[in-house]
Image: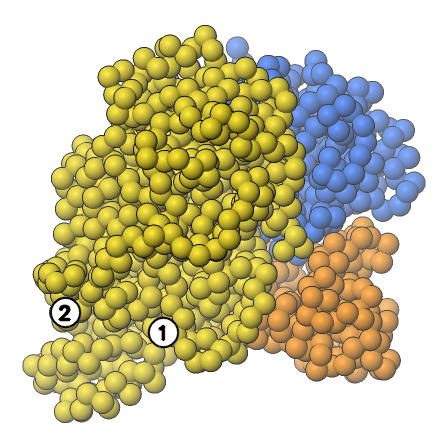
Amino acid sequence: MSVKIQAANVHLIEVKLRSEFNDAEGSAALALLREQGLTNLKGVRIGRLYEVSGALSANQAHQAGKDLLCDAVTQEFRLVPAAPAPMNGMNFWRVEVWLKPTVSDAVGATVAEAIAEGGLPRPASARCGMLYLLDGRAVKAQVEKAVAKSLANPLIHRVVVTEAHP
Amino acid sequence: MKKPKVLILRAAGVNCELETANAFKHVGGDPELVHITELRSGKKKLMDYAILSIPGGFSYGDDVGAGKVLANQVRHTLTDLRQFVRLGRPVIGICNGFQVLVKSGILPHSNACDQSASFTVNDSGKFETRWTHLRINTQSSCLFFKGLPEMIELPVAHGEGKLVLKSPRHLEDLKKTKSIALQYVTEDGKLMGYPHNPNGSIFNIAGLTNPEGNVLGLMPHPERFMSLHHHPNWTRQTYRKAPVGLEMFKNAVDYAR
Amino acid sequence: MNELSEVSDIDFPILGKPAKELRALGNARHLSLSDPEWAAIQAHFKGLKREPSLAEIETIAQTWSEHCKHKTFTSPIRYTEGKKTRTIKNLFAETIVAATEAVKKPWCLSLFKDNAGVVAFGKKWALAFKVETHNHPSALEPYGGAATGVGGVVRDILGVGLGAKPILNTDTFCFGRPDYKGALPEGAHHPTRTLRGVVAGVRDYGNRMGIPTAGGGIWFDDEYRLNPLVFCGTVGIMPQWAVKKEVKPGDLIVAVGGRTGRDGLHGATFSSANLGADAPSSAVQIGHAIQEKRVLDALLAARDKKLYGSVTDCGAGGFSSAVGELGADCGARVRLEQAPLKVSDLDSWEIWLSESQERMVLAVPPKCLKALENVFAAEGCELAVLGEFTKTGRLEVMHHERTIVDLDMKFLHKGLPRVEREATWTNSHAAKPAGGTTKKAGDALREMVGHLNVCSREWVIRQYDHEVQGGTIVKPLQGVRHDGPGDACVIWPHAATGDMEDFSCFAVGHGLNPDYGRIDPYYMALAAVDEALRNLTCVGADPARAALLDNFCWASPEDPRQLGALVRAAEGCAAAAKGFNVPFISGKDSMFNQSKDEKGKELPIPGTLLISAMAPVPDGRKAVTMDFKGPGNALYLIGRTNDELGGSLYHRILGRTGGEVPKVNPASAIDGFKALHAAMTRGHVLSAHDLSEGGLALCAAEMGFTGEFGCLLDLDEVPRDPRIYSNETLLFSESPSRILVEVKPENESAFLRQFGKSAKSAMVRRMGQTTANPILKVTGLEGSTCLEEPLKELKEAWQTALPKVLG
């Protein structure tokens, strides 16, 4: 696995359920998005994103991913590189849902604490976001609208929709 | 009679500790609520206790994954847990406690201490509370089930209780080592899907034990069946057997004596 | 303090400004201060010869908010009913408080003044109960709003007396229908999304904290679509010695729990304002249940070591209200730089007013501080000394040596100008029932069981851990397959008391029906109290020991008709308390539940009153559930049936309006409840279920399909108004105070003996029996079968209705 630093001391760690496991949360998200008119969607897989900033090196972030953030049996993780991934038309979408900075992030607080407890430098901050990987044809505006009405609340969430790999 | 000391492990978000302590007290144990920080600081020592119980709850909010953060702490702090187990002292992990035992590599038993099982979100996608019919594996030698009938009832309450294994090979291992302690079944003992299997666990597994039978991890809550009046149908008077949870805790305390 | 410059921070000049300008200044900051309130503030500072600071204005605005001061209930009202006009000086004092004082119960340990009402539970223990609403936040962000609603009411229980341990959560919701297909204004969530989010929020917070959520209900009506109601209740248990609290000058002000951030600013003032699209995002939070669990564990450990003299929660208004409240009778001096912060760039007034969750404030004698620090450190819970309580009668707040608030406590807490409001009520003399289409009894019943306000709530209930703490011995889902609609839960609090030999339990029931209120809020209130007491009685609780809570959710009290209806409902509460001889112990109101719809027209909610009732179950092993227990048992109906179909489910199904709303006669009702309770304690009752929406037919159907036995009923045996000649009226009327009871044949005479002389006034009569065949069969007045329905099909319709619309 190639590990790149996204920006100085800010690491984005992505944790996904391995494909061989049933993704009940993904199925629930799929049903919600279909209700909002994304009827061409075939599947949704779910992941968690952890944005960890502070004195951690890339190797240390990798260790936090392995020891703490990722389940040894059911999940896989990677450090998301800063460079944009190549696009693949409109057939796959990556949706990130983050709490706005003004909203307290309980999971992030737990993660920062647990990283420090695991013997790594205490992060200045850790934020947790939800990742949805959408499989199916759609246009960006459609995806954004559907997400705002189901998986995210624009009042408290920041949503990033990008085209993605399958 | 001697009252065996029971360590009821506490941490932020553990929330079934009082009823679990009551259960042990009720059957003649001497429970003590011990926070993981007290074990870390050395103020309390695991080896001073006869029984370890990791109760249910949402340790650290189940943030990152059910029981994950506490499992890491158990790995780093309770370094004498393996010895505790080897000495044959009873260990019971209930619900979140089961998840902690699995994610810290205590269950299912392995020599390498690696994690070979885990839990994912229930197939229903929802947290669910319901009473389940369960079958005890009479082949296994789990000390908690001594003298109990094969078919029992206990309630479950969890959102992330679907037991999964690293590979199909592991299921064969579990069967061979008689590590499957408890399975979700229908009222007449059949292996069926939802809602009988409330979470979609592989092979309907509700609880695991080690080959020696002194460690038990289970998703259902025995501490919620200490009295006949806990059973959902006690007002119908159709259930007249001794409460299962009471028997299980009593077995552990009797054993530790 | 005479020098203008001494109070600074960002100044907020108001002296000499016209009302219009002040109003604009206030609106820009979401202060929700009225013109007379601005005038009072102006006059106060003119007297002080200085301008206020921003922090002072914010402190006053939030202390005087509707949310904190309950202005509607405590200010004078000119009330006109028909041609008569009278002045009500203080609606709350003259109705609910007066009635409670009149019934005077020695087992009430704390009424109305603390964070929750407290009653004795045996000799050693006390139960505290509080129900709050979190409507506006839940409308904006259903998940976070509901979760922090639970968090808030749990903190009320932690902050009552010296702190109680939460042992039960109850949650009642009013939503638009999930199948609503009409338009919605920009920014409003669809009712389905609101419902899913609210349930998830309640679930995640309650389950994480380890408090069983085992009571409540849901009411659907499209007029709630823009203003959903979320009532969060918590019962706590505490030793009786911990009921009293006292702040002493010299005690340290200690903040515990979560850190202070920018979240939740203006929650109090905002919740009193009309909900608009421009709602500040900071008014919404997500909540951190585990943080609150830490506070709970540490606080109760410190309580048992007697390390503090008083405690309250940081709710609306944050530190400003918590410190202001604790120090109201003495004074307080605060140094804000001591407060642990989430982010470093907070302004002074933001720290002071922030409504960050999961915080409490304690009054700690200095000699106890060290021990207190140890207790909190052991739980990984942060603690900070913010200052001390004084004898000055002033609220003084410093931040880095600068004074940002210096207010007279008396002005702050008593200076609010009371403005008289107009209220009118026109009695719309029961109109004759009109309109709609007649339906066959069987068709109507099938439609009723699948009606959203009746159908199974299993989809919701199963998501709550209603058995944590191992004390839910009568569960919300009952019967052979654990899925029938229980009247109330019974809680055996052994986890908190540590005593598994003692089977003293308690139950909590609810009453709510806004459809009756549309006809007459006075009778809505009586019916709600009656329903809550019926529910309690059905599971074996002692109705004579019930304690009530009121929660009013209303539209704008500035509309005289809305306020008139509110007066009428409050007077109904008072009449119920006196008539049933039961006290109110706590209550809360939420006003301005109205919003502009998609066409810009105001959409008010129907006036809504939730009554919650709690009563001891002296021996939990004698509790009763609502499912039929066997064939060949006698069925007794307690209570008289009248032609009271106004606001009924039957009328709603037919599309009919008008009719008599159910009218409670509390004196005869309580006689019936008490007699039934006596029969239960002697073990003469197999099952009991109250008649509410859908009347006798629905009640019998539910008891039947939950117990998987049928029944044969004879309408001619129903105790009734002799002027009724219609089978439908007897089947579906919603006359109050009625309970259907199953009794073993050999116990019938002993059962009836409990009704003694009052047997006649309580109107108890055998009117049917249970059968092995699971069919509901009813003989009509004319002697032939008027209803025959297989219970299996009714149950299926009842069970599938909610999942069908929610997925």
Chain B rendered in what hue? blue
| Disc 2 chain ID | C
Residue A146 visible at all: yes
Chain C rendered in what hue? yellow
Residue C725 location in percent, x, y? Answer: 39, 35
Q: Quadrant of the N terminus of chain C?
A: bottom left
Residue C773 location in percent, x, y? Answer: 63, 22
Residue at 54% across, 15% down? C632
Q: Nearer the viewer, residue C382 or C475?
A: C475
Residue at 82% across, 80% down? A90
- Which chain is the one coloured orange? A
> Same chain for marks 1 and 2?
yes
B6, above or below A149, in the image: above
Residue identified by numbered label 2: C420
From the viewer's perspective, tell me whether residue C187 is left or right of residue C616: right
Residue identified by numbered label 1: C274
- Disc 2 element: loop
Residue C603 location in percent, x, y? Answer: 41, 71
C225, above or below C807, in the image: below
Q: Name the image quarter holding residue C546.
A: top left
The Cα–Cα distance between marks 1 and 2, rounded to whole angstroms, is 20 Å
From the viewer's perspective, tell me whether residue C193 is left or right of residue C747: right
| Disc 1 chain ID | C
Q: Nearer the viewer, residue B72 or C234?
A: C234
